[in-house]
Image (spheres, rainbow, N blue to C red):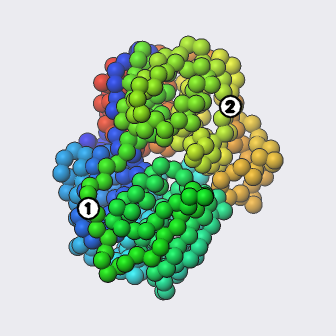
Amino acid sequence: MKNLDENVYIVNGGRLLEGEVKVAGGKNSSLKLLIASLLFDSDVVLKNIPQIRDVFEVLHIIDKLGGSFEWIDDNTLKINSSSLSSNTVDLLHGSKVRVSFMFLAPLLYRFGECYVPNPGGCRIGARPIDRIINGVKALGVHVEYNSETGYYYLKKTGPIAGRFRFNKPSHTGTETLIMLSAFSDDKVVIENSALEPEVDELIAALQQAGVDIKRSENNPSTIETNPANKSKGLKLNSDIFIKGDHNEAVSYAVLGLITGKRIRVAGAEISDYQVFLDNIAKAKAEFKIIDSQTAEFYKSEKLQPVDIQTAPYPGFKTDWQAMWSVLMTQANGQSKLSEYVFEDRFGYVAELRKLGAKIEFVKTPESEYDKFQFNLDPNKKDYYQTILINGPVKLHNGVVKVNDLRAGACLVIASLAAEGQSIIDGADIVERGYHNFDAQLRELGADIIKK
């Protein structure tokens, strides 16, 4: 593992980058499938796992619970849950990753009761856990919260069964209920579920083990699970290959569009980030699709402004909006970006301004509130969920601080486009989701080191 004490990127920007980058396995899929592996009564081999910090944090939790894992090679992990001995998620590591709350499903399956702490992860808003709690309760689980310890106590008091409808689609909530339904006692129906490709990867893994789970043919946002034959247990008959990370692909695409002589991005399904490609086409960006998993991106001098509203997949993903902001600083005119998924995901704007970006906030009209995917704060009068980005601007060097994963990648990309030396504090946050980020960038010709 890398030296974890090194936490600053030093970038000398202004270079024209060129080459090919193969994206790592999907961060979100990897984390969920690592946790789901504890549901299986056989070894689980996960291929194309990225060596990123969030993966290591989840592995720490598995180790603390008594599970075992083995790196077969740099990107292949074997997980075994037969030695699980604890039903309590470690507070330290659980507080570092959002997905730690999802351990409740395999722990309830193995022990009937468990203790999980409030989840961690990037601070990009309240990310209300109430939707997950309500769903878990609806399927027959008793839940208590101890504000003094910060732990939730959950207990299976009856059959796992029932129907639950999310008032707003929840990525983590959908996957948590899917894991619970893997050992259901009766039919489970999840309505208004998340549609992300990662959710389908989890469903496919459970189907391979014999779980009768599928999306409704008439309405894909409805997921139905019929009761499992628990006497047989869940056993996989082949390894699981994790698809390439489409969020990482978008990051490198933007890098190519503002710094690239030619950057080829390979390994992620084009269809998984087609919405992004559709929008850069509107912006008159220069790119070429090579095949179903490969595209090339070129520095685009005549970018046009395009307005964006983030939305649950298959809409324009919130994970892409920081990258879109830095791209639009190079567009010829003013663009508008509205963040409707999380209420506090513009923390990077002040940092981009330090590099010369011209961005201003505008108040969101109340008529737009129904598009918000987050819970409204009764004590908050006004929301500023929209920014106006003016371009093109000549970005310059500066010292900036990372406040969340995707924002960190955005700041690195902006620094690579800028003339002069920049310092980005918070490399550890970026490495929560990007495999060998600085090394990959150096392969493309970037002057970046980590200290």
Question: What quarter of the picture does the N terminus occupy?
Answer: top left
Which class describes the residues within 10 Å of circle 2: few (<14), some (14-19), or many (20+)? Answer: some
- The quarter of the displayed image where residue 212 is located: bottom left
Q: In which quarter of the image is residue 15?
A: top left
Q: Is residue 172 above or below residue 12?
A: below
Q: Which residue is drawn at 39% across and 63% down?
A: 207
Q: Residue 410: x, y in percent?
A: 50, 33
| Image spot of residue 243 (x, y percent) | 37, 45
State the SS at label 1: loop
Q: Name the residue under label 2.
A: 307
Query: From where the camera sits, is residue 67 visible?
Result: no
**Residue under the point 81% across and 48% down:** 366
In the image, taking residue 84 as reference, residue 213 lies left or right, namely: right
Mark 2 or mark 1, which has the lower sequence index?
1
Residue nearest the viewer, comparing 395 with 433: 433
How many numbered marks does the figure carry?
2
Type of residue at label 2?
Asp
Q: Can residue 99 be seen in this view?
A: yes
385 displayed left or right of 27: right
Q: Which of marks 2 and 1 is in front?
A: 1
Write down the residue under mark 1: 237
